[in-house]
Image (cartoon, rainbow, N blue to C red):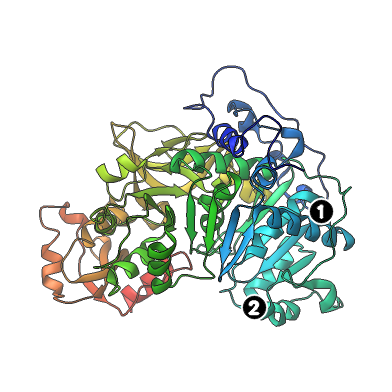
Amino acid sequence: MTDHPPGQAPGRSLQNLARALRGPERIAPAGPVRVVPPAPAAPSLLAAIAPGAAPRAHRASIALPPDPDRAAYPPPWTWPALHRPEDAAIRHDGAVTTFAALDAAARDLSAALAARAIGRGDVVAFLGHNHPSQIVALMACSRLGAALLPLNWRLAPPELGFILQDAAARLVLALPGYAPLAESLAPPGMPPGDYVMDPTAPLPAGQAGVAPGTAEDPALVVYTSGTTGRPKGAVLDGAAVVANARNAVRVFDLTAEDHVLTVLPMFHVGGLCIQTLPALMVGATVTLHSRFDAEAWFDAVEREGPSLSLLVPAIMAALIAHPNWAGADLSALRAVGAGSSDVPAPLAEAFHAKGVPVQGIYGATETGPIALAQSPAEALADPGGIGRAAPLCEVRVQDEAGHPLPPGRIGEIAVRGPNLMRGYLRDPEGTAAAIRDGWFRTGDAAQLDASGRYRLAGRIGDVIISGGENVYPAEVERVLMTAPGITDGAVCGVPNPRWGEVPVAVVVPGPGYDPEAVLRHFEGKLARFKQPHHVVTVTALPRTALGKVERAALRALATA
């Protein structure tokens, strides 16, 4: 087999794929639409999604760009292996996996899964830190029409047990260090050897003839963080995964010449789907770190020269505070993506001062995740912003009744597009509440300005009602993080006998901290009712694995 079609230069097919993934400049809801008929529902998984969620009604309103080969879904997995087989796909712990080796490993694992009677509609979990075998597992599952369930290894055993039971996972692919934990979670009466498998163990060569998965088959089941209650399993089908990749290719201008440094955990869609998968789909190289380490990040940027990386505000702050920051050479990076929570402008500006635009990304597990994004130019012009609707998305700010609001009004962000989840696993009520008339209600508050840019205001449920006025924590936090002597901070509401609630700043103090100076810093910058009533100091803010502030724990600290 040649590494490119006859008469075509090597790499040309990857360029064509990148163009196909980019699609037209803007996807308009009007005009002729090609609707792909849904695949037959698999009773083990598709039937567990809300009946009204498949096929998705909103898909008919979005005209997708043509796929290179829809019948051989998912084409982005196979193109790099066919046309750049010996190029580096993943670098991890000193080892290099080529695209050909990645594809062969996926073929072998899919055959091993099929031998265990894993097939269309089944769920296979992955437990472990970032590792190439997770990518192999996703590719292998997609060959069978099965879905991969990435597990957050930071969760306690009862939490993991709930997720595995809720998802009805048939098998857990556990890295060696996590196998004992996975075995302890096996269903009663099932031998651990039938429930847990080492994805790094050698496998016999896979055999051809496995029925391929389709774009309508569930590809990922990713559980939400559960900060507002029990986590819910968002089901993303193959078409949603590819649509999100198209958004990423356009947002970051990804090509096969790029090199992505991945340090965020791939048990979240951020670490997995914002840069990592899209980069592999266009034939770019991914350097994969098992977990974030500041020294390792600086070393990789300077020695290996990645062109892109994805961070969250907590990691950005850790890098800026690191002794290596002042002398760090970041010239290889042409941009950094940032999201998971509002990015304080000072953090973005610190990267900008080193010549690296910080492109704000907004989304949710349920949106694949990319829904809003900044271009590099917009990142420099609006530090800490979240930009505009991604190419394949429609986004609006709406009121409680679902009516669009004009620019300047704060309301809830709603998203529509082919990147949306199919629904929540075994939760038709939750699905119906989250997706109405094809629009996913994010629960996040924002406003649209006259230029078409969005600005986050916080979670709808986190709004502070003080004297009848709405105070959105994100608006106050943006000012708080520019106050002197603050290394980290967040805002929440606490009860007040006169006003009902008042804002309180919870901060991690740094050099030169003065609580009175912090309060004075707000004068003339925000209305009086938005200014913090007082300041509470802590050694660290309670945060999730992706750096989001845990609001319930924050309120407990503020009222202690």
Q: Residue at x 73, y 41 (%)?
A: 2
Residue 127 x/y as whole percent = 66, 70
Assign a secondary structure to mark 1: loop
- Residue 458 position in % (x across, y down): 37, 53
- The quadrant of the rendering that contains the N terminus is top right
The amino acid marked with disc number 2 is Pro
The image shows residue 17, relative to residue 528, as above or below, that is above
The relative height of residue 180 versus residue 93 in the rendered view (above or below) is below
In the foreground, 460 or 280? 280
- Label located before the other in sequence (1 or 2): 1
Reply above or below: 97 against 379: below
- Where's the C terminus, which quadrant? bottom left
Residue situated in front as seen by the camera: 344 or 472: 344
Which residue is disc 1 drawn over? 44
Q: Position of residue 375 (x, y in %)?
A: 37, 40
Q: Amino acid at mark 1?
A: Ser
Q: Which residue is mark 2?
A: 157
Q: Is residue 130 left or right of residue 311?
A: right
